[in-house]
Amino acid sequence: MRRTAYGVAAAVVLTLAGTTSGQAAAPNHDTPRARVWVTTPDRAELLTERDPVAFTSSTSTHPTIVVDPNQTFQRVDGFGASITDSSAAVLSGLTPAVRDDTMRKLFDPKNGIGVSFLRQPVGSSDFTAAAQHYTYDDVPPGQTDFPLKHFTIAADQQRILPLLRQAKRLNPALKVMGTPWSPPAWMKTGDSLVGGRLKDDPAVYDAYARYLVKYVKAYESAGVPIDFLSVQNEPQNRTPSAYPGTDMPVAQQLKVIEALGPKLRVASPRTKILAYDHNWQTHPGDVAGTPPGSSPETDYPYQILRSPAARWIAGTAYHCYAGSPADQTALHNAFPDKGIWFTECSGSHGPTDPPAKVFNDTLRWHARNVVLGTTRNWAKSAVNWNIALDSTGGPHNGGCDTCTGLVTVQPDGSVTTDAEYYTIGHLSKFVKPGATRIASTSFGTTGWNGQIMDTAFRNPDGSTALVVHNENDAPRTFAVSVGTKQFEYTLPGGALATFTWPQDLRSRYDAVSLTGATATSVPAGEGAAFIADDDASTRWSSGAAQAAGQYVELDLKSRKQFSRVAIDSGGYEGDYARSWQLSSSTDGTTWRTLATGTATGQLTTVDVRPTSARYLRVTSTGTAANWWSLADIRLYR
C-alpha cells in the first residue's frame, strides 16, 4: 500500500502558476522576482545563489505552496548554536586572520550566515576544554559559600567572552541565552557537579537564584547582556556521562523559579526565564532512570506552566533527542500565551561514517526537524549545539563523542563548514530577528514522506523568506503562490532552498478559521482527520480509483461566511478529482450547489457568491484511475 495515515487539513490558499523550474524569466523590471539560494546533499551547491525566478499570473498542475501573509504565527528571536568552552578553545587557537574570517562567516548578516541566537552554558558542560569542570562559585569539598563571596566569571574571560563580544559587534541583533548544566557542587546532594539534586533547603534555592542573577549581571557588565535564562539544562537527565548535570524534579524547578523570578525582574528586566529546557518528550532512558518511589514526570513542562510559578516564565525550551516537533504545538495549544523556544540539537555521526554520509544525513534530518519542524510548530528560535569543534568532535570532557558543529577546525588550522552551518544559515541569513512566521501550505513530514516541506516568514522590512526542502531523493517540481502571483520551481533530491522577495504580494482575501472542524467521507477511504492549520502533510484519500459520487463533507461546527474555496489535493501528483461539485448546507440535510467544474492539477480555487454555511461538501463527479486525495480545504472571505 502506498499510503500511510491521512487526514483533511485546513489553513490558507490561493491559486498557482509558473515559469519553468529554476530558469530566470524574461527581463521585466516591473515583474516581481524571487531570489533563490540552494544547498544540496552532495555539496555541489552550498548556499549557492541561483538565477532569480519571476512571478507570473499563469497556472500550474503541480503541488502548490500557498503563502498567506495575512495569517500570522510566532515572532522570531533568532537562529544559531552555542559557543561552548570547547568551541571557544578551537576558535581561539586559530590565527587571528582565520578566526576573524570564521567569525564573519558565522555572524555577519551580509558576508556570513548572520547567526542571531547563542545559547551559552553557565559554567561548564560536557564540551569543556579544561581538564576540570567548573561553575562560577567553586569551593573545596565540605565548604559552602552562601554569601557568594567566591563568585567569579574569570573562567570565561580569556576565550568565551571576547568571542561573544566579537559576535555582538558583527551582529548587533544577536540574542544570548544562559543555561547552567549544574549549580555549584556545594548546593547539591553528593557535593558533585555530576548528577545529584539541589539540596531541598530554602537557603539553597535562594542562593542558587542569587547565583544566577549574579551571572546575568556579571555578563552584562562584561558587554554581553543575557536575553533568556533557563535554570537547568536537561533536568531529567539524571545520570550524565561524566559531565555536569542535575536531576531537577518539577517541584525543585518551581522552587528555583519562585526564588529567581522576583530577583531577576528587578536586576535585569530584559532577561526572560524559560522553563524545562529538555526533550520534546521524556527520553526512554530518563524514564528508566527514575528513582524508586518517584514519578517520571513525562508532563514536566505542563506541570510547570500550570503552576503559580508560571507568572515568572516566558515559555518553554525544547531539545530534539526524543519526541517530535509536534509536541511543541501540543504545548502551545494548552498554553497559547506562553512562548516556545527550540534551544538544542546536535548533529551526530556513526564511528565509521564517511564525511559525505554525515553531511547528507545531517542536512536532510535537520532540514525536516530543526529548520522546518520546529518553526512550523511555534518555535521562536532554532538552535544547534556546538558552533565549532575540532576534527575529532572535541575537545570534550565526558558526554558526547560523536557530536558535530556548524564548523570544524582542521589539524592544519583551516576551517570547514558542516551541514549545520547550512541548515541554520538557510534560516539565519534570511529570516531576521523580529520576523513573523506566516502561513504556508506544506506537504512533507518531520518523519519523512518524500514530499515538499516548507516554512515562511515576513521580515520587519516587509520582505518574505520561504524555506523549502525536497524530502525526496528525486527532483521535485512545485509551485509557489502568493496573492495573484505564482512561480514554479524544481529542487534536486534532498535539497534545501531559501526564496526571498521584497514585494508585498498578499491577497485581498482573508482565511476563515476552521478550528475544530471535522470531516467525514463516502467512501470512508484512508483517514478523515481534519486539522485546522496550514499543514497539508496529512490527508484523506479514497483508497481506490476515483468514481462519481465519492465525497468529503466538512462540519465547520458553526456557520462560516466565505466567498472562496481552495480544494487542495496535496503532494501526490495526479490524485485530484477530474470533475467536482461544491455544495453547502446550513443543517447538513438540505444542500445547495455552489459550483461545478473540472480540475487540471493539484490545487483548484473556486470563487463563489458570498455564502454562509455550517456544512461543506466536495463531490467527485467523474472517474479516473488515480485515487482522489484531499490534503486541504480552505475557506476565504
Image (cartoon, grey):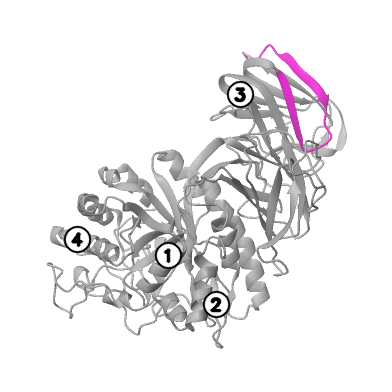
Image quadrant assignment for residue 496: bottom right
Choose mark 1 or mark 2, whichever is in front: 1
Choose mark 1 or mark 4, whichever is in front: 1
Which amino acid lies under the numbered mark 3 shown in the image of this protein? Asp
Q: Would you call the spot at circle 3 few (<14 residues within 10 Å), some (14-19), or many (20 or more)?
A: many
Q: Would you call the spot at circle 2 few (<14 residues within 10 Å), some (14-19), or many (20 or more)?
A: many
Q: Which residue is mark 1?
A: 169
Choose mark 1 or mark 3, whichever is in front: 1
Residue 195 lies in the magenta stretch? no
Cβ–Cβ under 8 Å for marks 4 and 3: no
Decide which of 371, 629 is in the foreground and name it.
371
Mark 2 or mark 3: which comes first in sequence? 2
Q: Residue at x 74, y 44 (%)?
A: 29
Residue 555, disc: 3
Mark 1 or mark 3: which comes first in sequence? 1
| Left or right of residue 31, residue 417 in this image | left
Which amino acid lies under the numbered mark 1 shown in the image of this protein? Arg
Report the span colored magenta.
Answer: 587-608
Residue 245: x %, y % from top left = 33, 69
Q: Which residue is mark 2?
A: 408
Q: Residue at x 62, y 45 (%)?
A: 502
Mark 1 or mark 4: which comes first in sequence? 1
Q: Is residue 65 above or below residue 351?
A: above
Mark 1 or mark 2: which comes first in sequence? 1
Choose mark 4 or mark 3, whichever is in front: 4
Which amino acid lies under the numbered mark 2 shown in the image of this protein? Thr
Q: Secondary structure at mark 3?
A: strand
